[in-house]
Every structure is written in C-alpha cells, then in structure tokens.
Amino acid sequence: MMNIICKAILVLSFMASAALAAPVAVGTWKTIDDETGAVKSLVEISETDGQLTGKIVKLFRKPEEDQDPKCDKCSGDKKDKPLIGLQILWGLKADGNGKWSGGEIMDPKKGKTYSCKMELIEDGKKLKVRGFLGFSLLGRTQTWERQEEIAN
C-alpha cells in the first residue's frame, strides 16, 4: 500500500512540474516591425477562459509623431479609439507545445483584421506572430521579444 502511495505522489509531482513548465505567451511583448526592424510597441497578452487576448500598452514614437494616435482606419467600436489600450489580438486557443491558433489580430496602421497563429520560440524569449488571410501562406510574420518590465 505504501509503495502505491509513493508512486502516486511521484506521478503527481511530475505532472505538476510539467504543468508549471508549460510554455506561456502571457506577459508583455516588444513588437518588432517585420519590414523596418524598428521597435513599435509593447503588447500585453493575457488569458481569459482559455483564450489569449492582447492590447497595446505602450508605443515607441519619434518626437515629431503624434504621441497619442487614434485608430483612424479601424472600423466598428475601435474606430478613432486611442491605440494605447486598444485590443489588437483575441481568440487564440492553445494547440499545445507553445503554439496557439484560431484567433485574430488587427493591424491598427491599416485598420484590417487577419487570422492569427502564434508560436513561442527560443525557450519562450520570442513569440512568432503570423497574421494571414485565408491560408497561412498568404500573410506576414513578426517576431516579438518578451519584455520583462514595462519601461516608461
């Protein structure tokens, strides 16, 4: 009987450590423009009811640029809303092993929404974010970097 209890405790401890080691995308990410290589923003990703959402929490703008831009090309309830605080990512569900799919991402510069999938890479230090129309082959990929703290 003691042997069975010891084995059960051992199995449960392995399961708990595996769950704790599961890769997560929740956190703050520095977005890097795939065309220019410039840092654009910080996006905070959170999880609710098993789905990931993301909102812009900081913009990196040149001094001559509008420091509080609005989403003038967006439609619906996002039209003319400030970019800071704007939800640009929603509905992503875990596929397992550091991958998520089935969601959408909005490009506030163009005001367009795309299907989205994401994958953690480099031991969770980077997040490969792909927005696409229809097929994953028709789209763009950005690599975001994990931000440990939000810098002011």
Image: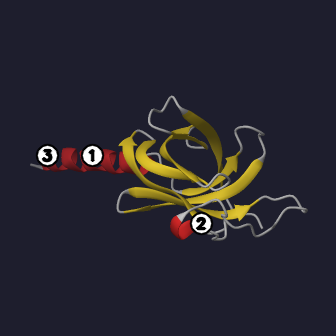
Query: Residue 50: image x %, image y %?
Result: 36, 57
Horizontal placement of 100 versus 89: left or right? Answer: left
Q: Are marks 2 and 3 in contact (CB under 8 Å)?
A: no
What residue did someone put label 1 on?
10
Residue at (70% x, 38% y) in the render: 34
How would you rate the neighbour count of disc 3 (Cα within 10 Å): few for under 14, some for 14-19, many for 20 or more? few
**Amino acid at dot 2:** Leu
* Helix, strand or loop status at disc 3: helix
Query: Residue 119: image x %, image y %?
Result: 50, 39
Q: Residue furthest left?
A: 1
Q: Are marks 1 and 2 in contact (CB under 8 Å)?
A: no
What residue did someone put label 2 on?
86
Query: Residue 127: image x %, image y %?
Result: 57, 43
Nearer the observer, 24 or 68: 68
Q: CA distance from mark 1 to mark 2?
A: 45 Å
**Amino acid at dot 1:** Leu
What residue did someone put label 3 on?
4
Residue at (48% x, 33% y) in the render: 136
Q: Earlier in the sequence, mark 2 or mark 3?
A: 3
Nearer the observer, 2 or 79: 79
Nearer the observer, 85 or 132: 132
Q: Quadrant of residue 129?
A: top right
